Image (tube, grey):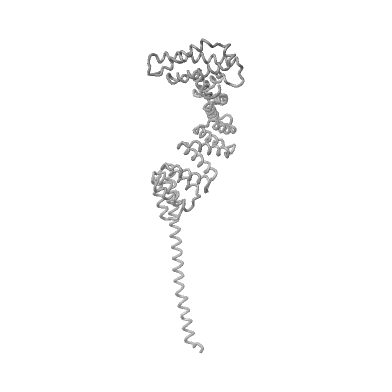
Amino acid sequence: MSDGPSNIALRYIQRRVLILSLIPLGVLFAITVTLARTYHEREAGLAREWFQRGNDDFSAGKPAVASADFRNALSYDPENREIQLRLAEALLDGGHAAEAKAYFQNLWEENPGAGEVNLNLARISAQTANVNEAVRHYREAIYGSWESEPVRQRTNTRLELCEFFLQNGRLNEAREELAAMASDAPQGQAMLHEQIGRLFLKAGDPAKAVQEFEAALQTNPRQSQWLEDAGKAAYEGADYEKAETYLSKAERENPSAEIGELLSTVRAVLRDDPYLPGLSDEEQARRTWNAFQQAFERLRSCVATSGASSNLDPTGELDILTKSAKQLKGRMNMRSLVAQPELRNDTMRFIFRIEKVTSHVCRIPPGSDQALLLIGKKYEGGNQ
């Protein structure tokens, strides 16, 4: 049965009412969306504002104030990883390591390969003397991802790891890491080579340190600090010829009393060392004879200085050395020293013993006696 006119009219009215009722609903929805968007934009703006304040306060050396700023920022944007990271860093800098670690740990669980997070966890582990955990996080930071300047960040982290090894007496690991850094370091990065050189010195490898200072000098051969560093490293490594080369250049570029005194000692070593390659038997004998005269005088002076005090020489070794020196002097001359290489060796060993003992009983003297001490140290345990 077809609809009557009354039913058609009713349906028309219903549609009109429905349409008219949807209009205010649509308006309300649009208003709600707009208000929500405005609210979220306002929240985002407040988060950015507090975040910027936190960065400013942190840069100004106010970690406690910065922490409060970052907390406010986080209240408006609680899922923001960057705000969480900066809050953790401010807490750590302010001495709240435990709370900072909780934030860093959460960030690490979300992204275990984050370089900055691992670096901070390494520092916290280092503060709490958890050495193995610190090393693990340092490694993860080196090979992890960085949002900006990844090469520089990884390099700085490796340098920090080397410092950490040195502070904890793990010298072999420090040397291995430094050697890897040295091989990777671009030739033109002089400052990096200088840093590696200084760390090699701390690690007890002056020869490698010299190589790094030399690499730095290739960019500027007249840089006085690098010349001085190279000279001092060579001196520490008993490479006195190289030390003389660099220290003399450093003195020309930037003279100082310290460099002058060190250079004088180095030149005394080179002048007095009877074991330098290329010396004739006559020159070796002459240097040995002069060294013996110097050491004998040093012994006599030390005996006179110590006087009758048995506290300075409780074992009586000075008396024993004095008797032995007089006996040796009675059977030694230039001719015998030239003809008998073994006598030269025996004499030098005796000289080194005099200088070593007198340096303990009396003060360590400058000049030729100090040079003889250094020569003895260089060849100690060798086949003189």
Residue drawn 54% across and 20% down? 269
For the residue pair 8 and 82, the one nearer the viewer reads as 82
Provide residue 278's location: percent of width, then percent of height: 62, 20
Residue 32 quadrant: bottom left
Query: Could one spot residue 255 in this view of the protein?
Result: no
For the residue pair 381 and 228, the one nearer the viewer reads as 381
Residue at the extreme bottom of the image, as rendered: 1
Provide residue 88's location: percent of width, then percent of height: 43, 48
Quadrant of the snapshot with the C terminus: top right
Query: Could one spot residue 320 in this view of the protein?
Result: yes
Residue drawn 46% across and 83% down? 10
Q: In the rendered view, would you say 209 is above or below 15?
A: above
The mark tally for this picture is 0
Provide residue 287's location: percent of width, then percent of height: 56, 16
Provide residue 158's location: percent of width, then percent of height: 51, 41
Q: In the rendered view, would you say 290 is above or below 236?
A: above
Residue at the extreme top of the image, as rendered: 330
